Image: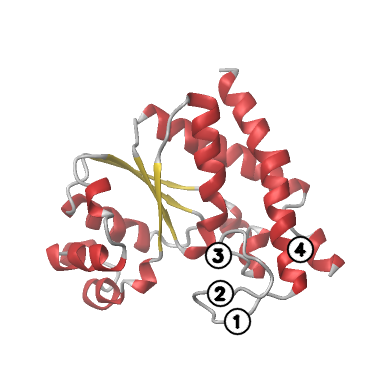
Amino acid sequence: MKGIIKTILPKPERQLLRGELENVIRVINEKGCETVIILDKAGRPLGVPIMKIMREAYGKTVKIYFVNPKKLKQIYVDANYTKSSITQAHVNALEREYPGILKNIAGKNVAIIDEQQQYGHTLRVMKKLFEIAGAKEITARTLSRWEREGDAYSWRRQKLYSVENPPIGRLFKSEKKQLTIEEEMAWRRLHEKMNTRIIPRVVQRLKGR
């Protein structure tokens, strides 16, 4: 149990995350983004920090969606990771998978945040998808540099990202397994560090500029 908890947002990772969040949120604010799309289920822990920092630093509210591109199998099969073959049919598939999302994309400034990037294929395909969906302006950013260094954020390595603040025993939607006590404690530690060591410092830096 202690081994799991100790690896949640260690100091070097917190320093990196603060810097990356600060940069991304500054861009979201400057571009006037009203909707933020976070790609991949591993990005779930970023939702609350982005909402809180935008509200506390700038007094703004943004709509956040967690979009897992792999669930949109039609896009992956048809597009084969290329943006040239994305069509309105794929936009319709997006709406079916995430009801109501299109009204928060059409005519809006949209930010796409990829928590971690390898080759950029997914980001390019999703950007094209939102262009067809009618986004006014699209800003795409990758949060983590750790992939290039052969590492990843601790919640990705431990796969503690399927649901937000899960109670003990609640089923993961994607993995269909029950949380262990260790996983529950790791989740609590992750959110504790986000709320006490990440969010306040990023807000302070953004307000000071």
Circle 3: residue type: Val
Q: How crowded is mark 1: few (under 14 residues within 10 Å), some or many (20 or more)?
A: few
Q: Distance between the residues labelled 1 and 2?
A: 6 Å
Amino acid type, residue under disc 2 in the picture: Phe
Circle 3 residue:
163
- Count of numbered tags: 4
Residue 201 % position (x, y): 67, 31
Tell me whether the residue at label 1 lies in contact with that at label 2, contact meaning CB atoms closer than 8 angstroms: yes
Q: Say which residue appears at 30% left-offset and 58% top-offset.
A: 126
* Residue 195 numbered mark, or none: none
Residue 53 percent coordinates (x, y): 55, 34
> Which amino acid does the dot numbered 1 rest on?
Lys
Inter-mark Cα distance, 3 to 2: 7 Å
Task: Name the residue tied to disc 2.
Answer: 172
Q: Residue sitting at 51 percent across and 57 percent down?
A: 43
From this viewpoint, which residue is outermost toward the left?
88
Mark 4–mark 3 Cα distance, whole angstroms, equals 14 Å
Height in image: 65 above or below 198?
below
